[in-house]
Structure formats: structure tokens, C-alpha cells
Image (cartoon, rainbow, N blue to C red):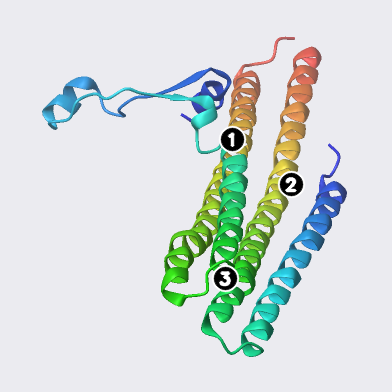
Amino acid sequence: MSSPRPALAASYGASLAVITLMCIAGLALVWAGWWGISGSAPVPIQVSYLVSGVMGGMGVLGFGAGVLVVQDRRRAEARERAELDRVVVAAEALVLAVRTEVAASKEAS
Amino acid sequence: MSSGLARAEMADFVVEESADAPEQAAQAGRSDVVVRVPSWFRASAPTWVWVSVVVGLVGFVLIAVAWGAVSGESEVYRQTPYVVSAGIFGLALVMVGLTVLNVSTRQRDALERERQIDRLVEVMEDLRLELREALAGASQPRRR
């Protein structure tokens, strides 16, 4: 059985890059919201920056962080499954060895 | 039970029955409920991953709508309803999408794990049978 690790690592790396970009974009949006609010005195204009920058940024940042948690957990699960696969393969080999041994002993007797 | 689950996934519908016998369920004052769930509706179905993505995107669209509406108003008392109805609700939808994604991926991983355990149990059962046969052969006297 081939190890799923190289493909796993490649897809994880790609998703990590996307998630990192999302988190950076979220932080940049929050910073842009703060920058807009601090530079404008009228409250209605500040509210616009609050919604577009801060809320949008929090949404992107929160979603990115959440997907990072999901991806990390899935990676750990995939690793555990790969380990369990090795146990299954070893058990199958053991059954085959016992079967061969039984057949050989029957022929000998 | 777990191999039954794997078989059920291939079927169009999943039938979940009460674990107890009908008479036991009746004694306990419960009806023997049979729930039919379409396979695409199960928590482990890929549908939920797409649902979570769509819900998250709707959340972001709502935030954009809130920004569009808020920037078009010059009075705070007119902006506030948009902030609450579209802005905060959009943010909440993003979080809901994330939660659905988390739960559905968890269920999918659990199903995969269950299949692996089923396979391991099958192999162990094979091993048990082979060993029993081998021990039975060894205990018999050899013919000359």
C-alpha cells in the first residue's frame, strides 16, 4: 500500500497558503477599518468603516482561523488513519502467513 | 452495526430504527420510530461541506449589503438597523457556516475511521478462524 503522506502534505500546504492569505486579508481589513474610523470625525462615516472594514475583516479572519483548525484536525485524523492502515496491512499479512503455514502443515501430514 | 452503516450509505435511504425490540420500546412508553433519511442529508454527506461554504458566502454578501446600505445613509439612527440586520447577521452566518463545516468534516472522518475499524475486525476474525483450524489440526494425531 502506498503512503498517502506526499499528497496529504501537498494539499495541506496549499490549503495552509490559502488560509494564511485569508487571515492576512482579514487583518488588513480590520486595520483599514480602524484607519478609516480614526481619520473621519462624523459618526455616520465611521459606521461605514466599521461595517465594511472591521466586520468584514472579522468575518474573513474568523473564517480563515476556523478553517485552519478544521484542516489541522483533518490532517491529524489522516495521519492516524494512515497508521491504522499499517496495522490492517500487517494483520492481513499475518493471516496470510498463518494460512500458508496451515496449508503446508496439512500437506506435510 | 458499523458494517451496516457502510452498507446503508450505498443505499438511497438510511433507515434508523430503535435499538430496542418493539415490545421493550412499548414497555418503556416509546413508539418504535423509524426515521428515513436521504443519503445526501446525512451529516457525513459532502452536501454539508457545500452548504457550509454557501452559508459563509451568503454571510459575506450580507456584510457587503450592510456596507452598501450604511454608506448610503447620513444619519446614525438610520444606519443602525442595517448594521444589526445585515452586518451582524452576516457575521453570524459566517460563523454558522464554519460550524457546519467543522461538524460535517468530523462526521466524514468518523465514517472513514469506522470503515477502517470494520476492516480490522474482519481481518482479526479471519485470523481467529485460521488459528482455530491450525490448532484443531495440531491436536489431531498424525497418520503414518
Label 3 sits on residue: A51
Residue A106 to residue B130: above or below: above
Left or right: where B4 falls relative to B138 = left
- The quadrant holding residue A84 is top right
Look at discs 1 and 3 and give the one toward the viewer.
3
Dot 3 falls on which chain? Answer: A
Residue farthest to the top, as pictured? B144
Label 2 amino acid?
Ala
Label 3 amino acid?
Val
Tell me, yes or no, if residue A56 can be seen here: yes
Label 2 sits on residue: A82
**Mark positioned earlier in the residue sequence (2 or 3):** 3
Per the model, the C-alpha gap separating discs 2 and 3 is 45 Å
Label 1 sits on residue: B47
Image quarter of the C terminus of chain A: top right
- Packing grade of label 1 (10 A; few <14, some 14-19, many >=20) is some
Label 1 amino acid?
Thr
Q: Callout 1: helix, strand or loop?
A: helix
Q: Residue at x 62, y 69 (%)?
A: A52
